[in-house]
Each structure stands twice: as C-alpha cells, then as structure tokens.
Image (tube, rainbow, N blue to C red):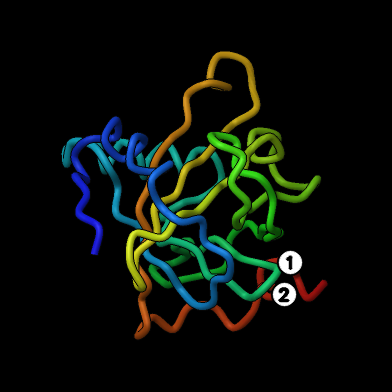
C-alpha cells in the first residue's frame, strides 16, 4: 500500500504523478477529504452549493459513473459522468478521466476528474476546472472502494432513465 498524508493536499498532488493511472473501475467509492479536519464541513457545504448536496462519493458503471449524494437522508443518484481513457493533464499518462455532460450545471461542464491507484481499494483523484482563476489549481480527493455500500441501482436512475 502506498502511504499518503491526507492532511496535505500538496503531498497528495506530488504523489499523483508517481502513481499508476486507473484503467477500469466498478462499484462504489466513498470520499476522504484532504486537508484540515475542520474544513470538511466547509467542503461539503461548497459541494452542496454546486449541486452535490451531501456528496458520498462516486459509483462507476463501466463507461459511466454517477455522483452519490444525500437526498432526504438517503443515498441518491446525483450528476452523471462519462468515463473514458484519455491523457491526464498533469503528465499526459493515459488513464480514466470523468467528464460531465453538456446539461450539467455550468461549472461542472468545465470539470474533469482523473484517477490514480493508491492500492487495490483506494484511489487518488484530481479535479480540474477549466475556468479562469482556478484553471491551474487542481483539487485533490481520495476515494475508498466501499464493497458493502448499496450505491444506486444504475446510472440511468440519475438521468431519469435516459
């Protein structure tokens, strides 16, 4: 297992390029937020404002994924993503990249998530927003495979069956 310091976003950023890009993901992954513990509620609040209230992680379904959010106290499907193998922005390594659809809220249409493997059950994620002022400030997150999490039934649940 690769050791990481969850309290240091800088160390996670530096670690990212030393890890192997994820090539395929299935199942539910729950988040661990980097940085100071007192910032976790602030980060969750910010995600809620941006359309991911009570963000609980991501569920991968091959070429698609869905953000898992909290709705009425229960896990629910949030915004969907398309998964593809593309060059990662940091170093051009080929790996999984998640992008949001054209009908996603404006900020998310300019967002990509990239994933590297920390160990067989843990991913290091890097979020990029292609927007002025934050274009060169990737945000780090860790995802843990949650084998016992029921997740949502399918990505179609989030998109109204389409």
Which numbered tag is attached to residue 159? Answer: 1
The answer for how far apart the CA atoms under marks 1 and 2 are is: 5 Å
- Expressed as whole percent of the image width and height from the top left, the position of residue 37 reads 17, 41
Find residue 106 and report its image quarter.
top right
Instruction: Give the structural element (helix, strand or loop) at label 1.
Output: loop
Q: Residue at x 46, y 51 (%)?
A: 53
- Pick the residue in front: 101 or 83: 83
Location of residue 73 with respect to 96 vertically, above or below: below
- Residue toward you, 64 or 103: 64
What residue occupies the far top of the structure in this picture? Answer: 133
User: Residue 59 in the image: x percent, y percent?
Assistant: 53, 70
Q: Is residue 58 found left or right of 61 in the rendered image?
A: left
Q: Position of residue 8 (x, y in %)?
A: 22, 35
Where, by quadrant of the figure, is residue 2 drawn?
A: bottom left
Question: Residue 28, percent across and down?
Answer: 46, 73
* Left or right for 24, reference 118: right
> Can you tell which quarter of the image residue 13 is in?
top left
Q: Is residue 5 left or right of residue 88?
A: left
Look at 23% across and 65% down and name the residue there.
Answer: 1
Please name the residue that numbered disc 2 is placed on.
Answer: 156
Quadrant location of the C terminus in the rendered image: bottom right
The label on residue 103 is none
Q: Residues within 10 Å of mark 1 (few under 14, many from 20)?
A: few
Q: Return the residue nearer the eye: 94 or 67.
A: 94
Give the tally of numbered discs: 2
Element marked by disc 2:
helix
Q: Is residue 82 above or below residue 47?
A: below
Q: Is residue 40 above or below residue 73?
A: above
Q: Are marks 1 and 2 in contact (CB under 8 Å)?
A: yes
Q: Classify 10 Å Cα crowding around label 2: few (below 14), some (14-19), many (20 and above).
A: some
């Amino acid at each position: 297992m690769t050791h990481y310091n969850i309290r240091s976003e800088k160390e996670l950023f530096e670690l990212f390029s030393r890890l192997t890009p994820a090539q395929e993901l299935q199942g539910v992954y729950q988040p661990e937020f980097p940085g100071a513990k007192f910032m976790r509620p602030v980060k969750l609040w910010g995600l809620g404002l941006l359309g991911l209230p009570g963000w609980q992680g991501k569920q991968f379904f091959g070429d698609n994924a869905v953000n898992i959010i909290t709705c009425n106290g229960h896990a629910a499907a949030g915004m969907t993503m398309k998964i593809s193998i593309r060059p990662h922005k940091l170093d051009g390594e080929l790996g999984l990249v998640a992008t949001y659809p054209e009908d996603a809220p404006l900020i998310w249409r300019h967002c990509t998530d990239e994933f590297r493997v920390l160990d067989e059950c843990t991913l290091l994620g890097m979020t990029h927003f292609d927007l002025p002022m934050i274009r060169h400030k990737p945000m780090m997150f860790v995802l843990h495979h949650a084998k016992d999490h029921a997740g949502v039934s399918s990505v179609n649940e989030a998109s109204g069956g389409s």
